[in-house]
Image: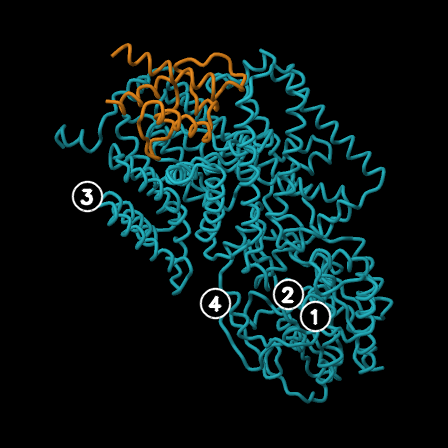
Chain colours: A orange, B cyan
Amino acid sequence: METNTNSVKEKISTYISTQLLKNKNVGTVLETTPLITGGLMDSISTMQLVTFLEKEFHIEFEAHEVDKDNFDSINIITQFVENKLK
Amino acid sequence: MSTSLLNKLFPIDIDKQSKQEPLWSFKRILAFVLTCFQLAVIFFIIENYRLEKASGINAIKYIIFIAFFVISFSPLRFRQFIFFSTCLAVIYFAFGFVVGSVFITICLGIIGCCLLPIKFWIKALLVTLAFSILFVLRIELFYAVRLSLISPYIASIFMFRIIIFLYEIKHGLSPKSIWESLTYFFMFPNICFLFFPIIDFKTYSKTYYNIADQEIWQKGIRWMLRGIVHLLCYRVVYYYFLIHPAQVIDMPSLLQYITASFVLILRLSGLFHFILGLLCLFGLNLPQAFNNYFLSTNFTNLWRRINIYWREFVLKIFFYPIMFKLKKRITKNLLAITMICVFIISWMLHGYQWFWIRGFYTFNSLDLIFWLVLGGCITVNAVIQEKQSQKPFKEVPIYKTYFMNSLKMVGMFLFMSVAWSFWSSSNLKDWLYLMSMFNRYSTSDLVLLSVILLSVIAVTFSLHIILNKPFWQKIILLPPQNTLFLTLPSLVCIAWFSLASARLSMPDKINGFVSTLSDEKLNATDKEKAEENYYKKMLDGEENQSTGLWETSLKRPRHEDEMDKVYIRTDDLLTKVFKPNSKILLNNRVVEIDSFGLRDKNYPLIKDKGTFRMALLGGSYEMGSGVDNKDVFENRVEQKLNASITDSAIHHYEIFNFACGGFYLIQHVELCHTKVFNYQPDAVMYVAHTDERRRIILSFSDLISEGKNLKYPILNYIKKVSGVKQIMSKTELITRLTPYADVLIKWSYIEIAKTSYRHHAVPIWVFLPTTECVIDADELRFLEKTAAEANFVQLNLTGVYGNYDLKKIQISDWDTHPNVFGHILIADKLYIEFEKKKEDIMKKAKK
């Protein structure tokens, strides 16, 4: 379970750092760094992340699930994805 | 009450409770006392500067203080209930028991529909039904004064929040308690401010007392202070920088007009900061609604900074759902299509919001174009950024970044100013004419503008450097409870400036400046618009939405078009005349038209021997707009003259009132040529007002817009030499005609005097200041000289309103015409001045 969590978290973290935020000079993105409320991710990058997660983990999201409650940090996203995977 | 019932009714949120300090701890009491002091200073400032006076926020300050105390020292679980009760108290205070009860019942009914344990579609249907009833009330399909009064407030509470609430309920969110649902809607500042941030239910629920309350209080005080600063800055721009479109004559004045128009958004951000700050005092630790929007460096950045709550609402309710729907069907241009849909919806929502607030909707194509262009720019910007993000990150020297950001900020500000001017224009013709002024500049203009532009860039660049220094970053990021050393002196300083006694020690200019800022009023441009609109435009929805004019419109009774019942439209220069023998009741005032088509009592056509008959020429003041027939000053003067007859040759005085709302000099000339002398007057009394030049130009431009036959050679000549055409925008007509104002006035005066003498009547020129009492000394000198040259007998009523507070002599905030008392003052003064010149008048009449 721990390994799974780490693997999900790593994939999400890598995508966010290397794809979504690679051109933004934001320094290190921690697992708890606020992504939406901190202004690092906007609606468009959130949708890009959703598309990535859906493809990567073969899950589907609903429109109302895309908000800062579920997408505001790597930890929160990981938790949310894991709940979907269960 | 059993513990289980108590817990069910007032559930305890252990997580939030754990974040609070003990209620009666010394530290907390100290923080509370300090916050109370700051709040008292804030209300002192609001009162002294008369900030948002019409909102009534100052009137409920004691309720706010009591509620703040009770809520702050009550257990957390009861606070929403007390907050709800506070809102009820404010509703009853504002609307009285009966109307207040109806208000509350309707609101509870709508909330109840959402909470009923029934299927979602039935809930939605019930809410739609309730809104349909509200719609009928709002458009005043049937006239129910009390219900009409509360409908905009109910609409303002529900128009957006009910959509969010239903959306969340649909997706499984259940409110933690009944009080959470009630307080989400019953937020008492909404009773004062119809424009209210679109608060998200989830955010509200999550952030409610989510940190120690002392921290939220200080955040609230900081935001209220920021709101006050924004509102004061708004006033500076509104009073000193905003010019009338007709004053735009070249590139510098155009830049002044468009930038000042955009900066007026400060009022909205000021209000939202104030409202959210106030809510912070009651535990609503909500996020910011505006975030330094003038510092936006691109379109997506602007979209993230300006009216953030609106953006969040649109994203949640429309953007994500549309995108999720579309992404299953299309892959290409998904973002662009979604964005366009979202911005069309934004435009519709904007109209929806205005409908509920004003009670009517007018389709405005400029609105749609504005939203589409803005949406297009944001989409393109987002796509470019998306593509750029795929490229490898390149380190850019920090000073280059600062410099580029400064350039982008200035560029965005100018672009938005142009876009804003487009949005707030009354029509495309007007806007294009204004933009044509970009071509009018001199070399010195260009040099000056370049210097200003470079200075702004240099200042922004320097600020980037300074504010990014660790010291300033530390200050900027300080939590609110640690910024007392900034908020407290700022508040005290603003409060001190508002004291008349403190201002006495200041130089005259500063004293005058602060005094002007201390009053809430329409600026010259909006006063003019309001006056113009009084007769025809207001109900077409052309008012500037950034300024206070829409509020003036909101307060105005919607029955002024009733006046149309006593008018007959004509094709001549008069444009309208009164319908003989008609009578209406307008706002409980009798408007009665006699058999000659004058707002007057019936007189015999043939003058009796020994009767001194006068014809009164004037506009709305003389017609007696807003007062009963019997109260018009002309009637009172007539009575006074008849009561004090001493001259054996004159047995009786009669004053025929030819005045009509919207009549200016050209109409008076036309009256003299066509109507007035059919009644054999011995004198023709023309009443001039402040702002004669502007009025005649406004009137002349209307005649040209309407394509009237100008009849008189001089009018046709001016039309020809000024190059005006019927198709031109109002702004262009006014700009082109303004240089001919003096010629028109002189011609009109001579015509009135000449026709009077030709018919053996004495022309009398009366100068009556408007209740606003702003007399342009230069213009008055010119008018006196012109009247003297035309051989008028002159009666100057300057000082007619004495030292009375102008509000006491005006009909209302939205109608500055003299009320009954104002007419009494005018009648007294006119009588005195007439008596002084009576001998001269009689002498001329005998000739």
Counting residues from the N terminus, which is met first, the one under dot 3 or under dot 4? 3
Marks 4 and 2 sit apart, C-alpha to C-alpha, by 18 Å
Label 4's element?
Answer: loop
Counting residues from the N terminus, which is met first, the one under dot 4 or under dot 2? 4
Chain designation of label 3: B
| Relative horizontal placement of residue B743, taking residue B538 as reference (left or right) | right
Marks 3 and 4 sit apart, C-alpha to C-alpha, by 48 Å
Image depth: mark 3 or mark 4 in front:
3
Label 1's element?
Answer: loop
* Residue that badge 4 annotates: B588
Marks 2 and 1 sit apart, C-alpha to C-alpha, by 27 Å
* Residue that badge 1 annotates: B707
Counting residues from the N terminus, which is met first, the one under dot 2 or under dot 1? 2
The amino acid type, in three-letter code, at marker 1 is: Gly
Image position of B316 with respect to B390: above or below: below
Counting residues from the N terminus, which is met first, the one under dot 1 or under dot 4? 4
Marks 3 and 2 sit apart, C-alpha to C-alpha, by 60 Å
Q: Quadrant of the C terminus of chain B?
A: bottom right
Say which mark, if any, is on residue B621.
Answer: 2
Chain designation of label 1: B
* Residue that badge 3 annotates: B117
| Relative horizontal placement of residue B425, taking residue A36 as reference (left or right) | right
Marks 1 and 4 sit apart, C-alpha to C-alpha, by 36 Å
The amino acid type, in three-letter code, at marker 4 is: Asn
Can see residue B62?
A: no
